[in-house]
Amino acid sequence: MNQIYEKRLWGGQNFDFYSGEGSHNPEIINPFLEAVTKFLKSFKQPLTVCDLGCGDFNIGQYLVRHAKKYIAADIVEKLINRNKTLFKAHNLEFLCLDIAKDQLPKADCVILRQVLQHLSNTEIQDITKKLSDYKYLILTEHIPWGDFTPNKDIISGQGNRTKKNSGVNLSEEPFNLKVKEEKHLCEYILDDNKGRIVTTLYKMF
């Protein structure tokens, strides 16, 4: 992941750190922010939120005010140090974590936004095992349009499974995530049959 930012593999030549169009295109991020903000504001007592793979925090910065505490984690240490400098709030904490290997922070709700799509099945399985510790999961994934074979394995990196006509589906093999409820929050259809960016809310057991 360090190399992705250092070599600007996701674009953003004029940025010190840039987490890609999916974190900066208003047509993609505005429906996500609207849906997640509505969900967070629906609680009388604000939730503690854990944002795993927070990236350059161009999205998370707008959600902090709706949380009791907002914990933002990423594997890239220089990025986390930069975020600590740029974003300040009494209820905001940044952590440098490998979310597949490290113990995850305690929270009510976890956000995984276009993170799993870049990881191998082994790493996703390691993360999935920890998700039952949360009450809610907000998951965003880039998936192909139409029928596809879920969860084809890849090597972790900048790409995703769409070139293999695949995408992450945690309810399918080999992950088999069990949830109480599932709700579609929003989606964005990419041009030129490049697939969809879909956000789903899961209520966990």
Image (cartoon, rainbow, N blue to C red):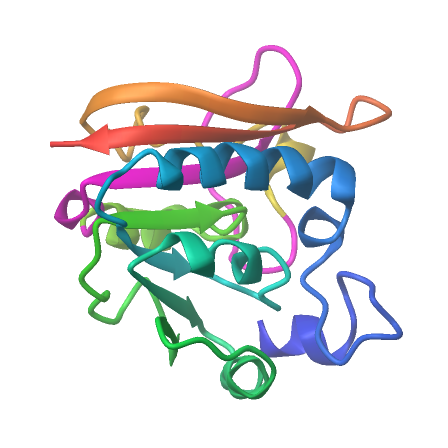
Q: Is residue 145 magenta?
A: yes
Is residue 13 visible from the viewing direction of this image? yes
What segment carries the magenta color?
130-159
Residue at x-position 45% and y-position 75%: 89
- Work out whether residue 139 or residue 170 is closer to the camera in this orientation and state it: 139
Residue 190 locus on image (x, y percent)? 77, 28
Residue at x-position 57% and y-position 35%: 34
Indicate the quadrant containing the C terminus: top left, top right, bottom left or bottom right: top left
Q: Is residue 20 left or right of residue 92?
A: right
Question: Is residue 17 positioned above or below 47 on the image?
Answer: below
Q: Is residue 73 left or right of residue 149?
A: left
Question: Is residue 82 positioned above or below 26 on the image?
Answer: below
Residue 44 locus on image (x, y percent)? 24, 40
Q: Is residue 190 magenta?
A: no
Residue 38 locus on image (x, y percent)? 45, 34
- Work out whether residue 19 or residue 143 is closer to the camera in this orientation and state it: 19
Residue 22 locus on image (x, y percent)? 69, 47
Query: What secondary structure is the stretch in magenta mostly built from?
Result: loop
